[in-house]
């Protein structure tokens, strides 16, 4: 699997480090310096590439993704905070029979955690005596808050029928690669569900796995739709 890394920051480097054990070869690296305004994304530059993995920044991702759609490159994107442009980007890939996987979180553990959040939401919907919160913490370089993952967890809980208030908060400090928690608190007890990433390897490995799945099964997907095809409550585009 010949991979182009679009974005060579913390995630791009983590993916590069895991690529050999995932059977992937890094064929091209685009960063801020050689891809200003996305102008390095051309059919010619990607002729020898099977799939692009894009991890850049909220303001940068939509432009890169529209160009990748135009160039006909199957693409995995993990950038968060750009989803106001999601419909436009999906339409660009769909209009060219292209392939795209996006997710605010490529950790398989977080995607399993999302299922647990749905079940907790279903159970606690009938117990309004419990107050509910959703919280996340990331390193102080992260640009968007709340994280895309926390927003998706809350959306999952709403879709599962939880209509009571959810207090949502974020912390930006230190080096933490990502912690997400949902909790329920009553007069007599507290229930907490928490996912703590130990490193970026879970996200990087998941993005490489998504690339492999996408090449086998072209189309437009959220990562969860590829991971849990028969049970996913949210269908692909
Ligand atoms: N979905 C997931 O599982 C997951 C996991 C972790 C992080 N994320 C998200 O992924 C994104 C990237 O995270 P990160 O920690 O890797 O951030 P990062 O360390 O800031 O890396 C982003 C990189 O993109 C580069 N860049 C800027 N403009 C570019 C362009 N036009 N073309 C190509 N590259 C360009 C930046 O270059 P400069 O440094 O030179 O500006 C930077 O190296 C964020 O949105 C983060 O929230 C998602």
Image: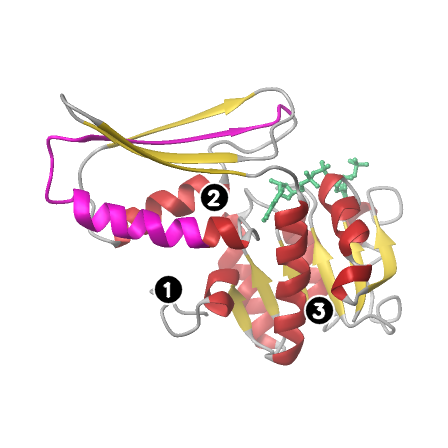
Q: Secondary structure at mark 3?
A: helix
Q: Report the span colored magenta.
A: 112-140
What residue did someone put label 3 on?
70
Q: Secondary structure at mark 2?
A: helix
Q: Can you identify the residue that label 1 sits on? A: 234
Residue at 54 percent across and 60 percent down: it is 88
Q: Secondary structure under badge 1? A: loop
Name the foreground residue: 54 vs 203. Answer: 203
Residue 4 lies in what quarter of the image?
Answer: bottom right
Query: Where residue 55 sits: x, y (%)?
Result: 69, 48
Q: In which quadrant is the N terminus drawn?
A: bottom right
Q: Tell me how far mark 2 sits from mark 1, CA to CA.
A: 15 Å
From the viewer's perspective, is 89 left or right of 15? left
* 3 or 1: mark nearer the eye: 1
Whole-angstrom CA distance, mark 3 to mark 1, is 26 Å
Of 167 and 81, nearer the camera is 167
Of mark 2 and mark 1, the one earlier in the sequence is 2
Residue 136 as seen in the image, left or right of residue 78: left
Rendering coords of residue 224 (x, y %): 47, 62
Q: Is mark 2 within 8 Å of ligand 1?
A: yes
Residue depicted at x 56% and y 76%: 219
Residue wearing tag 2 = 149
Q: Disc 2 versus disc 3: distance between alpha carbons?
A: 28 Å
The quadrant of the picture showing ligand 1 is: top right
Query: Quick one: label 2, few (<14), some, or many (20+) residues within 10 Å?
Result: many
């Amino acid at each position: 699997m010949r991979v182009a890394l679009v974005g060579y920051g913390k995630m791009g480097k983590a993916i590069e480090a895991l690529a050999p054990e995932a059977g992937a070869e890094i064929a091209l690296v685009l960063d801020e310096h050689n891809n200003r305004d996305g102008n390095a994304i051309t059919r010619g530059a990607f002729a020898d590439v099977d799939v692009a993995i894009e991890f850049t920044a909220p303001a940068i991702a939509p432009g890169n993704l529209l160009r990748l759609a135009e160039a006909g490159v199957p693409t995995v994107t993990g950038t968060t905070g750009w989803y106001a442009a999601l419909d436009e980007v999906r339409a660009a890939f769909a209009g060219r029979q292209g392939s795209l996987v996006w997710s605010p979180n490529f950790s398989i553990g977080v995607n399993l955690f999302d299922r647990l959040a749905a079940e907790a939401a279903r159970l606690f919907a009938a117990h309004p005596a419990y107050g509910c919160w959703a919280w996340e913490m990331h390193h102080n370089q992260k640009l968007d808050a709340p994280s895309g993952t926390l927003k998706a967890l809350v959306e999952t809980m709403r879709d599962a029928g939880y209509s009571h208030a959810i207090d949502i908060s974020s912390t930006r400090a230190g080096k933490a690669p990502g912690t997400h928690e949902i909790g329920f608190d009553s007069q007599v007890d507290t229930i907490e569900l928490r996912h703590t990433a130990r490193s970026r390897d879970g996200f990087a490995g998941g993005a490489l796995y998504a690339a492999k799945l996408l090449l086998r099964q072209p189309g437009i997907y959220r990562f969860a739709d590829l991971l849990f095809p028969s049970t996913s409550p949210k269908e692909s585009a």
